[in-house]
Image (spheres, rainbow, N blue to C red):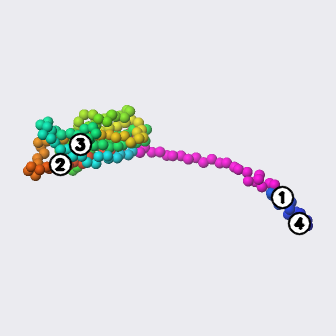
Amino acid sequence: MKRFLGLLVAVLAVAILSPAAHAATTGNATVTLAASASTMVQIVDAAVTLAPTPTDYDNDFVEITGASGLRVRVKSNSSTGMVLKVRCPDATPQIALADLLVKTQTAAGTGGTSLTSYSAIAAADQNLWSTGQAQNALLTVTTDIRVQNLFGYNDANGGGTTNYTNTLTYTVVTQ
């Protein structure tokens, strides 16, 4: 009986002290996001064809501008901004680089610049558009294209159409 009574007292003591033994405790954990500057470019218009009219031949150039131009979308989380660059890396371009001109009417971002007058495309990167701050939402930058010296491009088919094709490469880099 003494044993039973001793066991009963021990069980009661554990039952009374149990809530205190299970009291909540707290601790802290730290979450850190190590954000890096990142850029993105989306090519909206992967190809465009310029078909000169008789007026274009009179002017000796054909162009596409504004909404008809080549559109790319860019964004970056870099607090110091980004630069959209364009180049023609073709080893043997069909349109002479001096005859293929580019510019943009897209306004530069805060603290940035835009290539607003026609400039001959180059094999090396050239700055087309930039901003000096983060551009967190996709922004469309349109490239106006002009091909000059139209009489320098013969129709090899004799009365048909001959295509001359160059590839433009766009690159976005953080500043």
**Residue that label 2 marks:** 164
Dots 2 and 3: beta carbons under 8 Å?
Answer: no
Gap in Å between the C-alphas at discs 2 and 3? 17 Å
Q: Quarter holding the N terminus?
A: bottom right
Q: Residue at x 8, y 50 (%)?
A: 158
Task: Look at discs 4 and 2 and give the one toward the viewer.
Answer: 2
Is residue 127 something that shows in the picture?
A: no
User: In the image, is 38 to the left or to the right of 22?
Assistant: left
Gap in Å between the C-alphas at discs 1 and 2? 95 Å
The label shown at residue 122 is: 3
Q: Quarter holding the C terminus?
A: top left
The mark that comes first in sequence, 4 or 3, is 4
Mark 1 Cα-neighbour bin, 10 Å: few <14, some 14–19, many ≥20? few
**Residue that label 1 marks:** 12
Q: Disc 1 marks which amino acid?
A: Leu
Task: Look at discs 3 and 1 and give the one toward the viewer.
Answer: 1
Toward the viewer: 125 or 107? 107
From the viewer's perspective, is residue 7 above or below residue 89?
A: below
Gap in Å between the C-alphas at discs 4 and 3? 98 Å
Which span of residues is magenta-colored? 16-38
The mark that comes first in sequence, 1 or 2, is 1
Toward the viewer: 103 or 37? 103
The secondary structure type at the circle numbered 1 is: helix
The secondary structure type at the circle numbered 2 is: loop
The secondary structure type at the circle numbered 3 is: loop
Q: Disc 3 marks which amino acid?
A: Ala
**Residue that label 4 marks:** 3
Gap in Å between the C-alphas at discs 1 and 4? 14 Å
